[in-house]
Image: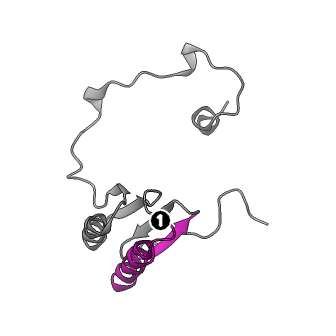
């Protein structure tokens, strides 16, 4: 069974031997060496959009959960327009994934519109 099969499933029942215990002392908590970070954001209002914009201007990727916004509310359109403008300003990219998520990227990062494993 390959590593990805172990991560994503698809291999029948699991036993304790299928899992590896990680020692947190071996994992660095500092992200100072990373040139870019991926942020997860929950958007419930206009103030959350400001934090997302700041992160993208700083060169980071943001995955925004917009399920807390009511779809009939004009706030959704306003926030989406603001985030689209930020992506355009920094020559990044923005994509809406379903009705509940958006991905916004900074300069030099493009989001593929093709799902992996879905090539025709």
Label 1 Cα neighbours within 10 Å, binned few <14 / some 14-19 / many ≥20: some
Circle 1 SS class: strand
Residue 24 in the image: above or below residue 5: above
Q: From the viewer's perspective, is 15 left or right of 19?
A: right
- Span shown in magenta: 71-97
Where, by quadrant of the figure, is residue 91 drawn? bottom left
Q: In which quarter of the image is the C terminus?
A: bottom right
Q: What residue is at 37 percent from the left and 63 percent from the top?
A: 61
Is the residue 100 above or below the residue 25 in the image?
below
Closest to the observer, 80 or 6: 80
Q: Which residue in the structure is indicated by mark 1?
A: 102
Given residues 99 and 109, the one toward you in this image is 99
Toward the viewer: 80 or 19? 80
Task: Check if residue 72 falls in the magenta segment.
Answer: yes
Report which quarter residue 43 is drawn in. bottom left
Vertical side of 34 occupied by 11: above or below: above
**What residue appears at the point 34 percent right and 79 percent down from the top-left corner?**
86
- Which residue, as the protein is rendered here, is positioned at the far front? 72
Image quarter where the N terminus lies is top right
Pinpoint residue 90: horizontal percent, then vertical percent.
33, 81
Q: Which colour scheme is used?
A: one colour
**What residue is at 47 percent from the left and 22 percent from the top?**
20
Q: Is 87 placed above or below 1 here?
A: below
Quarter-wise, where is residue 78 in the image?
A: bottom left
Q: Residue at x 24, y 69 (%)?
A: 54
The percent position of residue 72, horizontal first and vertical second, equals 51, 70
Let me know if residue 23 is in the magenta part: no
Q: Where is residue 89 in the image (x, y as percent from the top left)?
A: 34, 85
């Amino acid at each position: 069974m390959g590593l990805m099969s172990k991560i994503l499933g698809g291999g029948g029942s699991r036993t304790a031997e299928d899992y590896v215990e990680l020692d947190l002392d071996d994992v660095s908590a500092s992200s100072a060496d990373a040139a870019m970070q991926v942020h997860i954001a929950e958007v419930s209002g206009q103030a959350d959009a400001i934090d997302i914009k700041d992160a993208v201007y700083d060169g980071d990727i943001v995955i925004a959960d917009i399920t807390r916004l009511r779809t009939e509310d004009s706030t959704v359109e306003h926030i989406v327009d603001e985030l689209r403008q930020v992506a355009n300003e920094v020559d990044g990219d923005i994509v809406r994934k379903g009705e509940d998520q958006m991905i916004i990227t900074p300069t030099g990062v493009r989001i593929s519109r093709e799902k992996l494993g879905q090539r025709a």
